[in-house]
């Protein structure tokens, strides 16, 4: 029997539409200002944390093999069929941003629109739908 913390998964899944909306707004009005640069940085950081948190809850709840890194979280849940294969590369690229965003933030180029920010709205929306579908498939309701 699995213990999947659906409450915590759902809390994190509900963050995704907010991050998607922020990324879309930034994409539409990008002017390279400091404020927009910081907003993009935060939206990307929230996307990383949300995806890795969700992945960790799935790994723990469904007793998948232990992850050794943020990239491994994505690889493990991809291997378990949580989301379609075509999302994997964008999700891996996303989690690779964690170190630059969290540890090397002083080197981040805030005036440039990050190329991943343009494709993330679709990727995150598809990831959310896939996780929700996986939960229903594995646990019902």
Image (tube, rainbow, N blue to C red):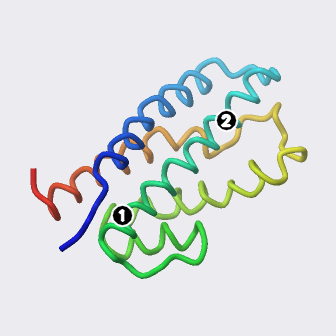
Name the one closer to the observer, 78 or 111: 78
Name the one closer to the observer, 115 or 38: 38
In terms of secondary structure, where does tag 1 sit? helix
Residue 128 position (above or below residue 79):
above
Residue 42 circle label? 2
Name the one closer to the observer, 56 or 27: 56
Residue 40 percent location from the top left of the image: 67, 32
Residue 92 percent location from the top left of the image: 56, 63
In terms of secondary structure, where does tag 2 sit? helix
Residue 134 percent location from the top left of the image: 23, 59
Q: Is residue 49 left or right of residue 61?
A: right
| Marks 2/1: CA–CA distance | 24 Å
Return the residue at label 1: 58
Q: Is residue 22 left or right of residue 1?
A: right
Q: In which quadrant will I find the N terminus? A: bottom left
Residue 26, image quadrant: top right
């Amino acid at each position: 029997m699995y213990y999947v913390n659906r409450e915590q998964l759902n809390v994190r899944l509900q963050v995704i539409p907010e991050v998607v909306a922020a990324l879309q707004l930034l994409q539409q009005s990008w002017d390279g200002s400091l404020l927009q640069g910081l907003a993009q940085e935060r939206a990307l950081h929230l996307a990383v944390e949300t995806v890795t948190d969700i992945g960790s809850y799935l790994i723990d709840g469904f007793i998948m093999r232990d992850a050794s890194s943020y990239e491994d979280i994505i690889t493990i849940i991809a291997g378990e069929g949580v989301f379609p294969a075509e999302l994997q590369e964008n999700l891996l690229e996303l989690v690779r941003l964690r170190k630059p965003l969290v540890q090397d933030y002083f080197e981040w180029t805030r005036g440039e629109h990050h190329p991943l920010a343009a494709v993330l709205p679709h990727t995150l929306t598809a990831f959310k739908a896939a996780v929700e579908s996986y939960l229903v498939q594995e646990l019902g309701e």
